[in-house]
Amino acid sequence: MGDLDDPRIEWIRDKIYQALRIESADVFNELLSRDEGLYERYLQTYLNEATDESNPSILFYKILRERDEDYDVEVPISDDEAVGPEGTAPETTTEGGEERE
């Protein structure tokens, strides 16, 4: 995982969390460990090999996505809403005594 013994990486992590309003502590470590540590190596290269003459820069961003989730919800059915035999609706009457469906 990430080399959090390096105070520069800790500082970057803290600034990213603050700027992007990230609360989960695992996000940064997950980033550094992606693709077999590729992004950790990129960050180490940036910190150790970049010079003022090379005009280095690094960009962090987050993407917010909404999740569509399906839920099965059981809803109790009252006797008035129950289905009669063979899938027919039960016979009900109105106040005037007329049949309704």
Image (tube, helix red, strand yellow):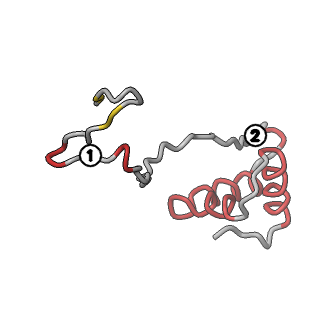
Residue type at mark 1: give it. Val
Q: Residue furthest left?
A: 86
Residue type at mark 2: give it. Ser
Frontmost residue, 46 versus 53 = 46
Query: Which label was assigned to residue 57?
Result: 2
Q: Residue 26, position in %: x, y?
A: 67, 64
Neighbour tally class for label 2: few under 14, some 14-19, many 20 plus, Cα within 10 Å: few
- Which quadrant, please, contains the N terminus? bottom right
The residue where tag 1 is placed is: 83
Q: Is residue 74 above or below residue 29?
A: above
Q: Give the quadrant of residue 12.
A: bottom right
Left or right of residue 87: residue 35:
right
Q: Residue 83, position in %: x, y?
A: 26, 46
The residue drawn where x is 77% and y is 55% is 47
Frontmost residue, 12 versus 25 = 25
The residue drawn where x is 31% and y is 37% is 92
Frontmost residue, 6 versus 34 = 34
The residue drawn where x is 85% and y is 58% is 11
Q: CA distance from mark 1 to mark 2?
A: 67 Å
Q: Earlier in the sequence, mark 1 or mark 2?
A: 2
